[in-house]
Image (tube, rainbow, N blue to C red):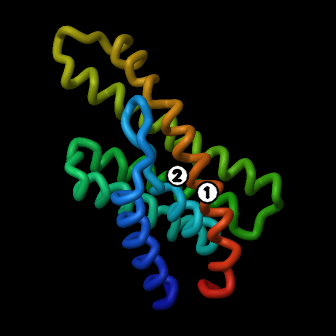
Amino acid sequence: MKTKQLTIGAVLIATNIVLSYVAKLPTPTGFVSLVETGIFIGAWHFGPKMGLAVGGLTGFLLDLFAGYPQWMFFSLIIHGTEGWIIGHYNVEKTVGVRILGNFLGGLTMVVGYWVAGSFLLWVTGGSKMSLQSAALAGLTDVPANIVQVLVGFILALIVSVPLRKWIR
């Protein structure tokens, strides 16, 4: 990676953490953060490696700083994979392929957190909760995660236009 790209990646990660930590949109099941915005921007402009780095490190560090250590490694994998997929399908591709990549990346995040949340519910529920019950309970976070992806996508679209000249 070039020095400029590395620097921009570090700035994206830091900005993403601050925005995600400070600007939380409340929902009935928790909150929606702006973490997706930086993931989309990094992946769109610099490809899968930057998407992986921005997604994984932002998710990991945000959970660490916010006091959710049980989510750190899940976030590293889920958001990192999301960023890699978005970047993979968005570098010099047709519009249809880019749309598919954005959808698959967002789907990865939503499904990944549903699976991770269900697993954590099952593990912490002990013998009182079956895996099926945990999976059903984990579905309650899915709508908020869909909103989070959509909000991040829209904000990234808005912010990417003026950033395009600066980051190239």
The percent position of residue 63, horizontal first and vertical second, equals 28, 52
Q: Quadrant of residue 27?
A: top left
Residue assigned mark 1: 86
Q: For the residue labelled by badge 2, is the local secondary structure a helix, a strand or a loop?
A: helix
| Element on which disc 1 rests | helix
The image quarter in which residue 26 lies: top left
The answer to which of 55 and 12 lies nearer the viewer is: 12
163 relative position to 62: left or right: right
Q: Residue flagged by tag 2: what amino acid is it?
A: Glu
Question: From what the image shows, is residue 4 above or below residue 119?
Answer: below
The answer to whether residue 87 is left or right of residue 13 is right
**Which residue is at 48% across, 81% downward?**
8
The answer to the question of whether label 2 and label 1 lie on touching residues, with beta carbons closer than 8 A, is: yes
For the C terminus, the image quarter is bottom right
Residue that sits furthest to the bottom in the current view: 3
Task: Report the disc number at residue 36.
Answer: none
User: Which residue was labeled with disc 2?
Assistant: 82
Q: Which percent across, then down, holds residue 47?
A: 60, 69
Q: Is disc 2 surrounded by few (<14), some (14 to 19) or many (20+) residues within 10 Å?
A: many
Within 10 Å of the Cα at label 1, are there few (<14), some (14-19), or many (20+) other Cα atoms? many
How far separated are the C-alphas under marks 2 and 1? 6 Å
Q: Residue at coordinates 29% horizontally, 60% vertically from top-left?
A: 61
**Rendered residue at 58%/50% (across/down):** 151
Q: Amino acid at mark 1?
A: Ile
Residue at image location 40% in from the left, 24% down from the top: 138
- x then y, percent, for residue 22: 35, 59
Number of dots carrying numbers: 2
Residue 64 located left or right of residue 93: left
Which residue is more in the foreground, 68 or 101? 68
For residue 61, above or below residue 117: below
Image quarter of residue 136:
top left
